[in-house]
Image (spheres, rainbow, N blue to C red):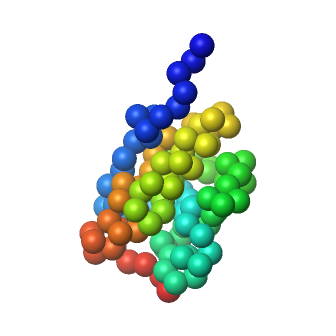
Amino acid sequence: MSQPLGRNNVRDLEPQDVARGIVEGRMLLVDVREPNETDLERYPEAFLLPLSAFDPHAIPDAAGRQVVFACRSGNRSVTASLAAQAAGLPYDAHLAGGIKAWKAAGLPTEP
């Protein structure tokens, strides 16, 4: 019997590394925050897929890019990664600290 997926199945990525990966075309950022949050502030170039309606198969073709989940503080992004893995997808990375860490690193957001 296989072990259930847990937090150890998700890799933490630092904001600067994710920002660089997006710019270099190596990463696809999937923001799982809710519309009331993303309406106020967004990650540049992120695909929006709220956790409340999360379907990992709705993530667009990553075209060779690494899929990285993001949220406000890093909790929902872990949940999304585990849900995607449970659905058989190889998405095992999230933005550690979420948009809070992103902004603390001085990275830009969009209104």
Is residue 73 or residue 65 the one in the foreground?
Answer: 73
**Residue at the image position 67 percent from the left and 48 percent from the top:** 56
Residue 20 in view here:
no
> Compared to 110, does 27 lie above or below?
above
Q: In the image, 103: left or right of 4? A: left
Q: Position of residue 23 (x, y in %)?
A: 43, 64
Query: At which x and y percent is residue 98?
Result: 40, 62
Residue at (60% x, 13% y) in the render: 1
Q: Can residue 101 be seen in this view?
A: yes
Q: Where is residue 2 in the image (x, y as percent from the top left)?
A: 57, 18
The vertical placement of 90 against 47, above or below, is above
Describe residue 76's horizontal placement relative to residue 101 as left or right. right
Residue beneath the point at 55% across and 76% down:
38
Q: In this view, does 14 lie to the left or right of 65?
A: left
Quadrant of res 19? bottom left
Residue at the spot x=61%, y=51% of the render? Answer: 62
The spot of residue 57 in percent (x, y) is: 72, 48
Compare residues 55 and 23 and report the one nearer the observer. 55
